[in-house]
Image (cartoon, grey):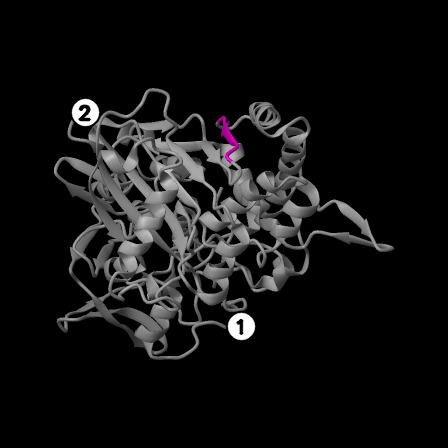
């Protein structure tokens, strides 16, 4: 939709063909008995991406279309040893003070110094990774690790951290700070022991640009983008599954739908790249001027538990609480090793103070989220698998929500099985943002393919997953179509 709105403003007649019955993809919503829940992302980072979209596509700014509010604290963290800390939104000094108070003198300074180094990695990678197309010389993004790791002397050798887990172990010197760092990677389905140190940009994004919430839930952001598309005369066809991309003389010329209808077009924009490859029947879509880095590892999925609670939300409750696993090695070993659902997961607990999500002030809607193996590695359809894991998530969330079980009216459990059915994402996986370093193994395929007129958009293409990156993907594709090969990136 981000690409569609921009292309329509540039003078193109745009039609969106959507296999499901509604817009928004994984930015979903579940409603029942007056309760409403976000089933995809619950918070927004880098809102400037969507502010830019609304400025470039119409007279009304983003804030005129949605009620965007900054969340404070950004998150409350409950660590394995029972220590708790609430981190203020977008305040380095506030975070330093809070961590010193909760974890002991020096903890805040180490975290603050880490954020300074993370900013350097962000400054080095922001433009090529987020605001420019993936150029044919993409290998330069993989050759150099952009995170300026501290030098560490051990056994007559000087070493620097090359992995995010090493950054935590060697530079933060506190298992709770390490858990704080690694939880930002795990939230995106990334293994801290396998991703490059450049993943430090993930907590930096939250720190630098703040954490934001849309009243009524993040689904309201999807609604606003959809309505902006309609206002720019973008047409939508729901329940319209594309079964092939049509071609003539080696160029994409449109799409064929499941019912046999053929829609002609000058340009075709879709995704994921793997799906486009199957729709063309042409084999590899990349090579030469259309770069594809090394295939990224399989993506993880999300387990989501929507809880309808009796009783009001307590005053002063944090919007988001991260309940850390008591055994991080065990959790990571299950998710990224054996492919089993972890017995004691890290759980993100969202408790928005939003009257639009509950029937009245005598009730509360809560969303629990955990990172889990996708369908490719775990059988979420097995009898009792989803409910058994939901029980573990609720048990963890009891550390954050007093009297949780006693307050529960009902729950709705969702797994990667739901994600695959509703969005078509293979295995119900959720794409992660692209990262520099690691020989390009954490990059995504380019938006331009080898077939003229065919472009890849969305979280599975450059610059990867997450709401900011998906919005930028739309901006990059629109720029490539409108300006052609001379497009140098978003301004």
Total residue callouts: 2
Q: In screen coordinates, is 300 left or right of 139?
A: left
Point 12% across, 38% down: residue = 33
| Residues shaded magenta | 82-88
Residue highlighted by disc 1: 288
Instruction: Give the label, 1 or 2, closer to the camera.
Output: 2
Quadrant position of residue 32: top left
Q: In this figure, which residue is indicated by the disc labeled 2?
A: 362
Q: Position of residue 89 (x, y in %)?
A: 48, 27
- Residue ID at (43%, 25%): 72
Q: Is residue 285 in the magenta section? A: no
Indicate the secondary structure of the residue bearing disc 2.
loop
* Image position of 398 (left or right of 14): right
* C-alpha span from label 1 to label 2: 61 Å
Q: Quick one: label 1 or label 2, which is nearer the N terminus?
A: 1
Q: Is residue 438 visible?
A: yes
């Amino acid at each position: 939709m981000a690409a569609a709105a921009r292309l329509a403003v540039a003078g193109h007649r745009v039609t969106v063909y959507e296999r499901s019955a509604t817009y928004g993809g994984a930015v979903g919503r579940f409603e029942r008995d007056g309760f409403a829940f976000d089933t995809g992302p619950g918070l927004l980072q880098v809102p400037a991406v969507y502010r830019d979209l609304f400025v470039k596509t119409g007279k009304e700014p983003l804030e005129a279309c949605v009620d965007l509010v900054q969340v404070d604290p950004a998150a409350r963290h409950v660590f394995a040893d029972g220590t708790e800390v609430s981190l203020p939104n977008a305040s380095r000094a506030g975070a330093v003070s809070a961590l010193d108070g909760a974890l002991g003198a020096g903890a805040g300074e180490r975290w603050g110094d880490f954020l300074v180094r993370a900013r350097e990695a962000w400054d080095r990678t922001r433009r090529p990774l987020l605001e420019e197309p993936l150029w044919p010389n993409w290998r330069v993004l993989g050759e150099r690790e952009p995170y300026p790791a501290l030098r560490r002397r051990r056994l007559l050798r000087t070493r620097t951290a090359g992995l995010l887990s090493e950054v935590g172990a060697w530079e933060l010197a506190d298992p709770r700070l390490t858990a704080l760092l690694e939880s930002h990677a795990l939230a995106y389905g990334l293994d801290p022991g396998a991703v490059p140190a450049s993943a430090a940009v993930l907590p930096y994004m939250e720190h630098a640009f703040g954490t934001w919430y849309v009243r009524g839930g993040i689904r309201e952001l999807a609604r606003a983008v959809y309505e902006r598309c309609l206002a720019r005369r973008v047409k939508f066809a729901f329940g319209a599954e594309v079964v092939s991309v049509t071609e003539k003389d080696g160029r994409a010329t449109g799409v064929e739908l499941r019912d046999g209808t053929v829609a002609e077009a000058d340009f075709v924009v879709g995704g994921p790249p793997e799906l486009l490859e199957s729709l063309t029947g042409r084999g590899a879509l990349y090579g030469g001027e259309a770069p594809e880095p090394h295939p990224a590892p399989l993506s993880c999925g999300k387990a989501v538990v929507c809880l309808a609670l009796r009783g009001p939300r307590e005053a002063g409750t944090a919007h988001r609480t991260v309940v850390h696993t008591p055994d991080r090695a065990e959790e990571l070993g299950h998710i990224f090793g054996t492919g089993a659902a972890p017995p004691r997961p890290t759980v993100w607990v969202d408790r928005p103070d939003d009257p639009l999500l509950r029937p009245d002030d005598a009730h509360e809607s809560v969303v629990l989220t955990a990172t889990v193996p996708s369908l490719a590695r775990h059988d979420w359809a097995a009898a009792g698998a989803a409910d058994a894991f939901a029980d573990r998530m609720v048990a963890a969330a009891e550390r954050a929500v007093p009297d949780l079980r006693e307050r529960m009216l009902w729950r709705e459990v969702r797994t990667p099985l739901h994600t695959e059915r509703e969005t078509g994402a293979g295995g119900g996986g959720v794409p992660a943002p692209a990262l520099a370093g690691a020989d390009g193994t954490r990059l995504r395929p380019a938006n331009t393919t080898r077939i003229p007129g065919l472009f890849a958009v969305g979280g599975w293409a450059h610059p990867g997953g997450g709401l900011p990156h998906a919005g930028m993907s739309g901006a990059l594709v629109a720029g490539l179509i409108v300006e052609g090969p001379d497009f140098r990136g978003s301004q």
